[in-house]
Image (cartoon, rainbow, N blue to C red):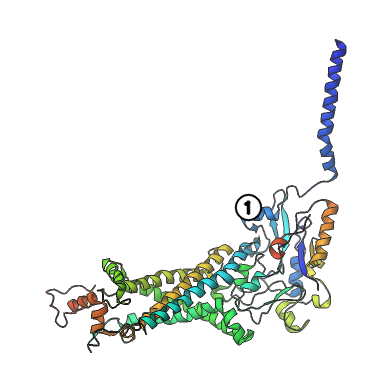
């Protein structure tokens, strides 16, 4: 019995020894070779977790604490590939559509000819605001497109030095003309807001093709649905390009590098779509429609033009001023 | 021709900032500009690592791709340089650069950042090698003198290696083999789309 107990204790002891031996073998091996990187930060792991690596720097420029930001690569793809496609399709596509439209439909004529009598459509102040914004827009558009399309299109034609010189001036023009442009957008928003609230007349106008497609002459107040669309494109698009543009002009005040990349994406995409929309606006205001340009040119339009394109507005105006054959109102109605 | 690269052995960097100082002194880099900097990750925590970073002279460099005036060029040694005469200071290279290398002399409102400045791999710029104009715009051209970048040359722990990519990768591999560990060549995957197996 005693020998049996001894046998058990021996076996247990031997097993325990074996267990210690096997357990301690790797730890001995580890002592031979310490791995200080076992707990160290690893680049790929950090990139997977945070999509960028940031740390601490002892220099004042805290932007430099971003060690690696591979997001710059996606922004590069956007700038060199995606934006050129979006911008190219939007702008060239719009030009093609306008050209085809002009060739098939031609200028929208005054169906009833000119009456010879005119009515004031835009005041001097309204025209000043319009042309200030428009002039700035054209310079901003050309200098902006130069940043995206200048390198592949213009640089090979005029050479490095000339292109850099031109781009430098274009950049200054772009930055400084943004201020009158922004003021113009704000003024446009305020002075034409009342006439640009969508209503049910617009639905009918749109259903009838606005008199542009076909030869219908749907009624409209001061601004028809198409003009309202342009108005809101200017207000919203202009607001977006201004906000994102000022973020680019005052870099790193509001955000870090990802915010700057996002600002450039918003700025450029909205801008190319804005340019495409403005091409249509310029078309319809010049060669697209007879008698339209003088509204912003001299500020007055022909009575027949007003009758054909803004019949409800003409009625309103006549009622307000009591002009011509319209019945005089007993009491003066407040403007608008 | 060699393909020049930087390699920072983060397991050796002790954040002494000698590379930063050497660079500033060698090229008389103005205040506010740091062509090279040392970033400490997880500072004060177990496993912290310091990495010295400058322009990595990327393969297919993003800065060059996004530059609106195409002012960048790559030398026969694979060094990415730029012309300050052509630069319009738009700041786009900073948005595209994965390593925050481009620097601007001014705060930068109204797009008046001034001409971009960055690490030249001690290889100057488009002006004649070693000329006064080159020194004033870009700093010393050590490469033309047959010398390697000063930051790496005077690194106290030889953490920062500069030279032909294959040679410095081999040195790093041997180190890792000998000591038995290595946290990898920081930034290599992003800059050169390759890593060093360790």
* Point 58% across, 73% down: residue: B108
Q: Is residue B32 left or right of residue A218?
A: right
Q: Residue furthest left?
A: A330
Judging depth in this view, the residue of A98 and A78 nearest the camera is A98
x%, y% of residue A128?
A: 36, 82
Based on the displayed image, in which of its 4 quarters is residue B182 positioned? bottom right
In the figure, B67 relative to A113: above or below?
Answer: above
Q: Residue furthest front?
A: A104
Q: Say what secondary structure mark 1 lies in.
A: helix
* Quadrant the N terminus of chain A occupies: top right
Number of dots carrying numbers: 1
Q: Is residue A334 left or right of residue A299?
A: left
x%, y% of residue B139?
A: 74, 77
Q: Residue furthest bottom?
A: A116
* Point 62% across, 64% down: residue: A63
Q: Evaluate whether residue A133 shows in this view.
A: no
x%, y% of residue A181?
A: 43, 77
* Point 72% across, 81% down: residue: B126
Judging from the image, mark 1 belongs to the subunit labelled: A
Q: Evaluate whether residue A114 shows in this view.
A: yes
* Pointer 1 local density, CA inside 10 Å: few below 14, some 14–19, many at least 20: few
Q: Residue furthest top?
A: A1
Q: Is residue A116 left or right of residue A140?
A: left
* Quadrant the C terminus of chain A occupies: bottom left
Q: Which residue is mark 1?
A: A49
Based on the displayed image, in which of its 4 quarters is residue B117 positioned? bottom right
Q: Is residue A144 left or right of residue A65?
A: left
x%, y% of residue B10?
A: 76, 57
């Amino acid at each position: 019995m005693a020998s049996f107990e001894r046998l058990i204790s021996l076996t247990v002891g031997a097993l325990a020894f074996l267990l210690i031996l096997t357990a301690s073998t790797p730890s001995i091996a580890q002592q031979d070779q310490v791995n200080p990187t076992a707990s160290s930060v690893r680049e790929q792991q950090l990139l997977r977790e945070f999509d960028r690596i940031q740390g601490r720097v002892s220099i004042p420029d805290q932007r430099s604490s971003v060690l690696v930001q591979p997001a710059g690569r996606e922004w590069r793809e956007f700038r060199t590939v995606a934006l050129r496609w979006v911008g190219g399709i939007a702008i060239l596509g719009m030009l093609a559509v306008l050209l085809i439209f002009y060739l098939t439909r031609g200028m929208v004529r005054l169906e009833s000819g000119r009456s010879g009598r005119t009515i004031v459509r835009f005041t001097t102040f309204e025209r000043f605001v319009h042309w200030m914004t428009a002039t700035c827009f054209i310079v901003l558009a050309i200098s902006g497109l130069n940043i995206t399309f200048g390198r592949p299109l213009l640089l090979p034609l005029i050479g490095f030095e000339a292109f850099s010189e031109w781009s430098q001036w274009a950049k200054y023009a772009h930055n400084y003309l943004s201020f009158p442009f922004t003021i113009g957008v704000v003024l446009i928003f305020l002075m034409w807001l009342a006439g640009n609230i969508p209503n049910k007349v617009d639905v009918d106008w749109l259903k009838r093709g606005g008199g542009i497609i076909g030869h219908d002459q749907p009624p409209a107040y001061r601004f028809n649905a198409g003009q309202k669309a342009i108005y809101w494109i200017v207000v919203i698009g202009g607001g977006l390009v201004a906000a994102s543009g000022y973020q680019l002009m005052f870099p790193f005040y509001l955000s870090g590098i990802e915010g700057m990349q996002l600002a450039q994406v918003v700025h450029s995409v909205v801008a190319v779509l804005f340019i495409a929309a403005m091409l249509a606006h310029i078309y319809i205001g010049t060669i697209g429609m007879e008698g339209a340009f003088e509204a912003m040119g001299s500020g007055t339009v022909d009575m027949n033009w007003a009758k054909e394109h803004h019949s409800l507005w003409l009625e309103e105006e006549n009622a307000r001023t009591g002009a011509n054959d319209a019945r005089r109102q007993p009491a003066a109605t407040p403007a608008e | 021709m060699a393909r020049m690269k930087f390699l920072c052995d983060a397991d050796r960097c002790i954040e002494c900032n000698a590379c930063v100082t050497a660079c500033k002194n060698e090229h008389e880099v103005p205040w506010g500009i740091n062509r090279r900097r040392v970033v400490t990750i997880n500072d004060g925590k177990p496993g912290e690592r310091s990495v010295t970073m400058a322009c990595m002279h990327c393969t297919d460099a993003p800065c060059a791709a996004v530059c609106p005036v195409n002012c960048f060029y790559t030398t026969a040694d694979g060094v990415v340089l730029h012309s300050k005469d052509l630069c319009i200071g738009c700041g786009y290279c900073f948005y595209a650069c994965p390593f925050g290398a481009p620097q601007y002399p001014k705060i930068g409102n109204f797009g008046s950042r001034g001409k971009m400045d960055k690490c030249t791999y001690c290889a100057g710029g488009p002006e004649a090698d070693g000329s006064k104009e080159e020194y004033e715009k870009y700093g010393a051209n050590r490469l033309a003198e047959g010398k390697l970048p000063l930051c790496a040359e005077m690194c106290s722990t030889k953490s920062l290696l500069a030279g032909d990519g294959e040679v410095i990768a081999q040195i790093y591999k041997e180190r890792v083999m000998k000591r038995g560990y290595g946290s990898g060549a920081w930034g290599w995957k992003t800059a050169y789309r390759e890593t060093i197996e360790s």
